Amino acid sequence: MQINICENPIATAKAFAEYMLAWHKQHGAMNVALSGGSTPKILFDLLATDYAAAFDWTKINLYWGDERCVAPTDSDSNYKMTNEHLLAKVNIPEGNIHRVLGENDPEQEAIRYGQLIEQNLPKKDGNPVFDIIILGMGTDGHTASIFPHEIELLDSAKTCEVANHPETGQKRVTLTGPVLNQARSVCFLVTGDNKKEKIKQIFEEQDVAKSYPAYHINPKEGELIWFLDEAAASSYKKP
Ligand code: 6PG
C-alpha cells in the first residue's frame, strides 16, 4: 500500500493525473473505472484541461465503479457529472464511454453492465481485470456503492450488484469486492477534513475499521495507492 499525501485537493488530483499518465505511457490502452460523488470533479477538470492533450483518448475505455439508478440527465448522475467535467471536453470516442444505464431497471442493468464488463475486459481468477479503478470513500467508510450495511457485496460472486443507499434508499449499481480487488491498480482519491477519522482508523487498522468496506479493498496482485490531501490525512500520523 502506498500513501501519497498532498497539500490540497488540486495537488492530490495532479498527483493522480501524473500516475495515470505514467501508466498510459507505459501500457497504452487502459480500462479505467471512475468514481463518482464530488471528489473526482477536480481531477476530471484537470484531465480535461492541463492533461487533455497528453492522453491518447482513443486508447482509454471508461467505466464507472458505481452509478446511481437515475437518468443520465439527473443531477445525481455520476455520468452527468463526468460528462460535464471531462467527457464533453476531450476527444474520447463515444464507443469508449461505457455508462451504467441508470434509467433502466436496476436488477436488469446490474446484469447487463456486468456482462458488458466481462465481455470487454481480460479475466483473472474468474473476475474481469480493470487496469485502474479510482475509488472515493464516504464519511461512513463506504466505497463505490458498497455501504457498511451491505458489506456482503465485498464477497459477491457477481461482477455488479444493486446496492441501496442507507439513508435515502436510492438504488445504485456497483462493482463488487472481488472485481475491485482484481484490479491491476486501485487508487483511492480522498480529500477533506470530514474523512480524517475514517482514514486514521483504516490506516491504524483499528477494529472499528473492519466494518468499513473501504478497509477491505486491497488488490490481490495489484497496487493499492491512497491519494490524500493533508486535511483527510490530518489525524493519521505515519509511523
Ligand atoms: C458515489 C461514489 C461514492 C463516493 C463517495 C465519496 O457514487 O457517490 O462513487 O463511492 O466516491 O461517496 O463521495 P464524495 O467524493 O462526494 O465525498
Image (tube, grey):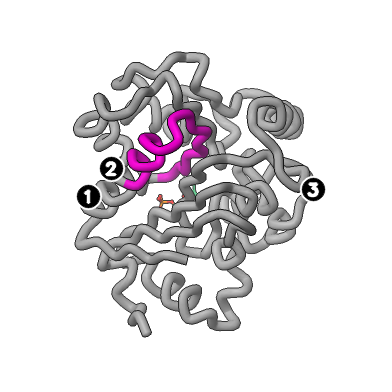
Eyeballing the image, is 217 above or below 111? below
User: Which residue occupies the foreground of this view, 199 or 173?
Assistant: 199
Identify the amino acid type marked 3.
Answer: Ala
Q: Amino acid at mark 1?
A: Ile
Q: Position of residue 51 (x, y in %)?
A: 25, 32
- In percent of width and height, residue 95 lies at 52, 15
For the magenta stretch, what is the residue range?
19-37
Asked if the residue at tag 1 contacts the one at tag 2, i.e. Cβ–Cβ closer than 8 Å, the answer is yes
What label does residue 42 carry, if any? Answer: 2
The answer to whether the residue labelled 2 contacts the one labelled 3, judged by CB atoms less than 8 Å apart, is no
Kindly give the residue lying farthest to the top in the view shown.
94
Helix, strand or loop under label 3: loop
Which residue type carries mark 2?
Answer: Ile
Badge number at residue 10: 1
Which numbered tag is attached to residue 192? none
Query: At numbered mark 2, what does the secondary structure look like: helix, strand or loop?
Result: helix
Disc 1, SS: helix
Q: Which is more N-terminal, label 1 or label 2?
A: 1
Report the residue at 77% width, 43% height from top: 126
The answer to whether the residues at label 1 and label 3 have Cβ atoms under 8 Å apart is: no
Q: Of circles 2 and 3, which is in front? A: 3
Viewport quadrant of the C terminus: bottom left
Q: Is residue 161 visible?
A: no
- Residue underneath mark 3: 157
Q: Is residue 127 above or below residue 153?
A: above
- Whether residue 26 is in magenta: the answer is yes
Residue 142 falls inside the magenta stretch: no
Can you tell which quarter of the image residue 101 is in? top right
State the separation of the CA atoms marked 2 and 3.
Answer: 34 Å
